[in-house]
Amino acid sequence: MKKVISAILLLAILSLSFTSCTCCMSDDEKQKTLENVGAAEPIVKEYVDKNYSGASIKNSECVTYTSYYNVFPSTYASNYVKTRVQYNFKEFDILTDVTSGESYDNFNRDELIDSIESRVMSVIDVDTPNSIEIKFAPKAVDSEIEDEIWYYTDNKIKSIDDLLGENEYNLYVVFKYTDSSMDFESIDASPFFNDDSLSNIELAFVNYRSADRFSDDELVFSADDRLSDILSTQDSMYKMSGVKIASQIESPSYDDSTDTAENEVTFEENYYHYKSETVHGVEFVWNDEYYEVDFSEIPCEPVVTTEYYSGAELYAIDDTAIKLECEKITDKELEYDNDIHMYFDKSLYKKLVVVNKDNETDLWNLELKRYDRIYRYELLREDNHTITLGFYEMREYENRE
């Protein structure tokens, strides 16, 4: 009993130590926060006097961020200071880079969000969405401070036209729908964009499969994110059936002959359709712009052996196996989102699946859980694939029939 109590106490002490270390800030970093607040004071005062004469400065704090690259996460002082200000009975924040001396504020946040939403609805023929996610941030602000970068602009940015007319911002707009009958593929998003803008602008319309899979959680967390990456993940494919993305991105264009690079703006629209089909209790999700998949149920071999588990015999727990015939139906270059994702009932937890793909055998242990289901995936790369899934278990000798 004493050993048990000692072990519990030791575990509690270690847990407490780890928790306290996850927010560690060295004395040098603490000192830097104070120095940055002091350095920002005259910059903020000048900014307020110029743009919000008569405003009162409430308080200032150095923005910190946490790095997880070490064994124990550590917190550091950034080069940014956030200052709370009141002007004409309205409180807002000023974000100041003490290194460059640049300041931004979020005084016009709500007006800009409303302006962006109204512009989309007025120039693009779409239904009213269930919800809208809008985020914008200056390109110059380091993404390492994450949540603190959003909704700040230069004071002269008063409307969507101002924002699109600049080359200094990242703008993300996501319209979210649930089981909509709207034709997402035919949406023409180009009228929203300004040909002269060098800002990075991404606009998406996403259709969630059903109310139980709809999520109003934020999709964009970092200004380094691309919607094409976010909306082609396994999580998005499970929840969404259709995604239309339009983007106007500034990127360097390299000239090999002169070994120089110039920034250019490219506009593109892409549509992704994620099909879902349930066969024998297993849900399959894939991008059917790339592959056509035919399913069938076939008899399952009652006893099999593989190279795994030292060649032990595996006994079928289901008389039916699932067969997939996959055919590539596009000339497009295959991307990472052409995997086929599979969701098994949680009752199969720790059961075995014998997978035969193109006459090569693999063995899955169903352990990875997603959305109260068990998740696996299979890569689709060739012009044709044949895949079979059979469900098995390994029994102790005395329990074998």
Image (cartoon, rainbow, N blue to C red):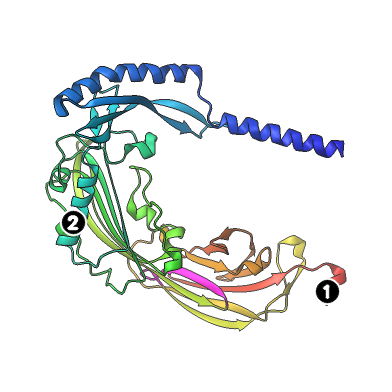
Residue on which the image places disc 1: 400
x%, y% of residue 63?
A: 38, 29
Residue on which the image places disc 2: 118
- Image-quadrant location for residue 65: top left
Q: Residue at x 53, y 82 (%)?
A: 296
Measured Cα–Cα span from mark 1 to mark 2: 67 Å
- The 10 Å Cα crowd at callout 2, few under 14, some 14 to 19, many 20 or more, is few
Query: Closer to the camera: disc 1 or disc 2?
Result: 2
- Image-quadrant location for residue 318: bottom right
137 vs 375, nearest the viewer: 137
| Direction from residue 231 to residue 70 in the image, left or right | right
| Element carrying mark 2 | helix
- Principal SS element in the magenta part? strand
Q: Quadrant of the C terminus?
A: bottom right
Which span of residues is magenta-colored?
281-291
Q: Residue at x 50, y 17 (%)?
A: 27
**Amino acid identity at mark 1:** Arg
x%, y% of residue 300?
A: 66, 80
| Element carrying mark 1 | loop
177 vs 242, nearest the viewer: 177
Number of dots carrying numbers: 2
| Badge 1 or badge 2: first in the primary sequence | 2
Q: Quadrant of the N terminus?
A: top right
- For residue 41: magenta? no
x%, y% of residue 218?
A: 38, 51
**Amino acid identity at mark 2:** Ser
| Direction from residue 328 to residue 304 in the image, left or right | right
- For residue 285: magenta? yes
Q: Residue at x 40, y 69 (%)?
A: 209
Q: Is residue 106 above or below residue 388?
A: above
Q: Residue at x 17, y 29 (%)?
A: 52
